Image (tube, grey):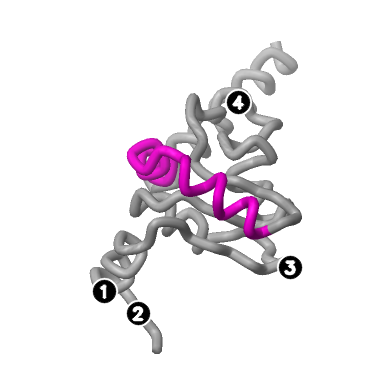
C-alpha cells in the first residue's frame, strides 16, 4: 500500500539499498527520498538516476560543486552488479548528499543563479 510521512521514512531507513529498476523515470524523486534517509541507490544508468547520482555514483558529472567525496549509489546496466556496489556505499554520505536536495538548498541555488544573472545584466548595462 501507499506510505507517507514518517511511515515512508521508516520504510526507507529499514532498507540496505534502494533498488530503482525503472528505465523511464524523468527525475527520480524517490532516489532523493531514499538518499535523504541514508539509503544508497542501485539503478540503471538512465535519465533520472544519472541526473541525481551521476555515472560515478557521486553526483551529476556536469556540476563539479556537487560532486560528493564518497559513493552514494551505483548505476549499472546489470542491476545485480549495481546492488552489490551500492551495498558498499556510505550510508551517512548518502544521507548528507540527499539532504542537499532540500527546499532550502534549492532556494539557495535559485537565489545564487538570480544573483549571477543580475550581475551579468548590470555589466552589460554599464
Q: Earlier in the sequence, mark 1 or mark 3?
A: 1
Quadrant of the rendered structure where residue 108 is?
top left
Mark 1 and 3 residues: CB-CB less than 8 Å, in contact?
A: no
Identify residue for label 3: 24
Secondary structure under tag 1 reads helix
Q: What quarter of the picture does the N terminus occupy? A: bottom left
Measure the alpha-carbon separation of dots 2 and 3: 22 Å
Q: In the current view of this chain or complex, which residue is farthest to the left?
A: 6
Q: Which residue is drawn at the image coordinates 48% and 60% (left, top)?
A: 18
Please give the range of residues in magenta: 79-99
Q: Position of residue 101 (x, y in %)?
A: 45, 46
Depth check, front residue: 40 or 111:
40
Depth check, front residue: 104 or 26:
26
Label annotation for residue 28: none
Q: Position of residue 76 (x, y in %)?
A: 70, 50
Label annotation for residue 7: 1
Identify residue for label 4: 118
Secondary structure under tag 3 reads loop
Q: Earlier in the sequence, mark 2 or mark 3?
A: 2
Q: Earlier in the sequence, mark 2 or mark 4?
A: 2
Image vertical order of residue 3 relative to residue 103, above or below: below
Residue 95 located within the stretch drawn in magenta: yes
Measure the alpha-carbon separation of dots 4 and 1: 43 Å
Secondary structure under tag 2 reads loop
Measure the alpha-carbon separation of dots 4 and 3: 36 Å
Q: Earlier in the sequence, mark 4 or mark 1?
A: 1
Amino acid at each position: 500500500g501507499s506510505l507517507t510521512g514518517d511511515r515512508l521514512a521508516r520504510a526507507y531507513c529499514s532498507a540496505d539499498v534502494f533498488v530503482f529498476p525503472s528505465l523511464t523515470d524523468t527525475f527520480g524523486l524517490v532516489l532523493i527520498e531514499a538518499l535523504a534517509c541514508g539509503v544508497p541507490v542501485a539503478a540503471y544508468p538512465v535519465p533520472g538516476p544519472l541526473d541525481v547520482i551521476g555515472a560515478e555514483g557521486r553526483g551529476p558529472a556536469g556540476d563539479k560543486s556537487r560532486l560528493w567525496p564518497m559513493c552514494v549509489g551505483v548505476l549499472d546496466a546489470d542491476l545485480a552488479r549495481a546492488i552489490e556496489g551500492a551495498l558498499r556505499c556510505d550510508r551517512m554520505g548518502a544521507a548528507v548528499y540527499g539532504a542537499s536536495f532540500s527546499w532550502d538548498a534549492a532556494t539557495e541555488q535559485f537565489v545564487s543563479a538570480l544573483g549571477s544573472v543580475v550581475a551579468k545584466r548590470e555589466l552589460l548595462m554599464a
